[in-house]
Amino acid sequence: MNKILIIIHREYLSRVKKRSFIVMTILGPILLAALVIVPVFIAQMSDKEKTISVVDEKGIFYNAFPNTENIKFEYSALKIIDAKNNFDSTDYYAILYIPADFVSKPSTAALFSNKQPSITVKQYIENILKKELETMKLSSSGIDKNVLKSIETNINLATIKLKGKGLEEKGNTEISTILGMFSGILIYMFIFMFGTQVMRGVIEEKTSRIVEVIISSVKPFQLMIGKITGIAMVGLTQFLLWILLTFAIVTFFQTLMPNTFNFKNTENPIIGNSKIMNQEQMLQLNEETQYKNQGMRDIIESIGNIDFGVMIFSFLFYFLFGYLLYAALFAAVGSAVDSEADTQQFMLPITAPLIFGLVASQFVINNPEGPVAFWLSIIPLTSPIIMMVRIPFGVPIIEIVLSVTLLILGFLFCTWLAAKIYKTGILMYGKKVDYKELWKWLTYRS
Amino acid sequence: MNIFQAENVTKRFANHTALNKVSIAVPSQSIFGLLGPNGAGKTTLIRIINQITGPDEGTLFFNGEKLQPHHVSLIGYLPEERGLYKKMNVGEQALYLAQLKGISKQDALTKLKYWFEKFEIQSWWGRKVEELSKGMQQKVQFIVTILHNPKLLIFDEPFSGFDPINVNLLKDEILQLRNNGATIIFSTHNMSSVEELCDYIALINKSKKILDGSVKEIRTRFKQNIFEFELSNIKIDLKDIASNKFQILTESTEDHITKVRIKTTAGNSPNELIQHILPNAEIHTFHEIIPSMNDIFISQIEGYMEENN
């Protein structure tokens, strides 16, 4: 037992101290954090406050343009010619010109600027003009504004999980999908990354011939288990460091630029300026805000309803046992060959179920309760990926118990199988090994 | 007292038998040569002693007890195919391998320091193994093999890859180890080093042991009553003394000294031969030709081949 610890110690330290591990540990969270930060950052980048001067010849659009966080409107009494001539001496971003005959000829309105105005500004103004004009036209043909209001409909189907005994829980299919796919891909990545590390480690020991010295001190099984465990700990370390560092980086940026990451504000950019709006606009905006708030609340509520304890625990379990099962097989492959180039023929039966699991997860996500999802989350070779995809959608306890039991049994069986191949393989040099040969090794008496 | 003993050990692989009822006895505090052509089964026997593989039949004894897993800490093994982790520091690696043999880290550090100083390789401690030459790696591995003061040491071709100076250094170390109480099983194809170092040998061919015993005894056993003289002022033709008792094998003259090899028939003492020579020539040297291990090795293996064909 003590010797296994010595082996684990070496396998762990020699990898954690490697430059590639440190680089991956630092790069991983930066990439992950970038996924969160960069889109927000880019969205806010060009958001210098822009003031637009409105030259409205008839004055019917006075105060029709609600200010946003980044676009402010000032209503000018100047003639358009003067406004244009004075443009350079002002700080205006652009001049919005609404001529007197705008209502009859909508295409006469124009936006003057000394540069190409941004598409957001253009679309924002277009939308408001369009809405105002439509309202005007509708009321002139006798349709009441309130009737119109009541026709406008927004639909977002709430998904609610029944938890039995009349208990309900608000779910969010999108979030479950993202979470499920993300965990599935992560498990796949980790099994692959660290499984091949086990294989490389075994090949390294075999080709450098140090294995003969080591197994004159310890049993081959101890060496194999020590190596697999050591590398599992490397994987867990990397995973935890990624989570911690990602969290640290995001928090750092949040405190550095509180406004950029204050999601509540960006969701309701208009509410602060409601003073200057007329009653109706305010009503309308409030309703929009309310709708948006409702969506946000739903998301927050359903995130809150996801049991992260269960998620993290099951992730760690399926990662660990999925990895252990595959790592044993990878070790067996490594022991049977003389160099990494020879691994091809033995890799296929190992990588095929892994890749199949990843591909199948796309279908499982669309029907997490179907028979395909059920069977793939029970069979040990695919269950680590598929079960993780299913768990955010809620899986009956009995299926989880079945899946967990079979995975543990599968792990024990694979380790037993791999140990038999490993024991013989590490001492075989310069022999072209095929499946027939592997079968012979399996049937050797110890 | 035998430190190691194998009785009727048989090991079969799928297609062939690697060892067929092999029995050897390795006396304590001796150097024991394990000889045989390539593929004879030496490596399999060594692996069985190291408990890397188990025998199909037969019993093994270590120091009078049945061979058990805990005995590995009393055995040191230097395999023919040397190997260390290429990317690992020399020092860390030596510590790791020593700890696997069951000595504490502190103990290992003290001992490693002693040996690194003795071999004058302290400066290698922090270097990666891949930066060392092959001979340097061999030295490190030698130290690792003997570090835990094993009672039984197994060296498989220990001198391959060393220059003559380091071969001598190693030979001295091996003799020193034996004098300090260790027993060495020594597998090699280099017969002159067998004569120089080994006290006992066993010869294995085609999975069977065909010869064993002490080196002196074996060489005496295989001597063929051949005597060599160096003579001058020969008054007769040497062929005249040839008779049914004496047979001249070779005769050559250089700088007035004639070298002659004479075989006597069994039961004839060399004194009688000298009596024949003495009146007729001046004797400068006289000695009996004892067969070299090399000759015995070749004659035994070839004889065995002929018998079995």
Image (spheres, rainbow, N blue to C red):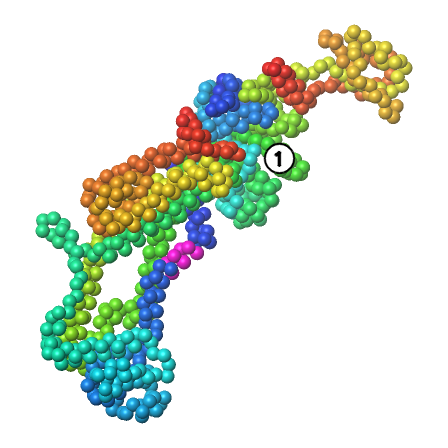
Q: Nearer the viewer, residue A363 or B258?
A: A363
Q: Position of residue A147 (x, y in %)?
A: 10, 73
Judge left or right: residue B212 versus residue A291.
Answer: right
Q: Magenta region: which residues?
A: A23-30
Q: In which quarter of the image is residue A126?
A: bottom left
The stretch drawn in magenta includes residue A28: yes
Q: Residue at x 40, y 36 (%)?
A: A222
Q: Nearer the viewer, residue A414 or B232?
A: A414
Q: Is A209 placed above or below A277 here?
A: above
Q: Nearer the viewer, residue A398 or A172?
A: A172
Judge left or right: residue A180 versus residue A286.
Answer: right
Judge left or right: residue B80 versus residue A227.
Answer: right
Three-letter amino acid code of the residue under disc 1: Ser
Q: Residue at x 16, y 79 (%)?
A: A137
The stretch drawn in magenta includes residue A181: no
Q: What kind of secondary structure does the magenta stretch mostly adopt?
A: helix
Q: Which chain carries label 1?
A: B
Q: What residue did someone put label 1 on?
A: B160
Q: Which residue is drawn at 41% across and 46% down?
A: A12
Q: Where is residue A354 in the image (x, y as percent from the top left)?
A: 35, 44
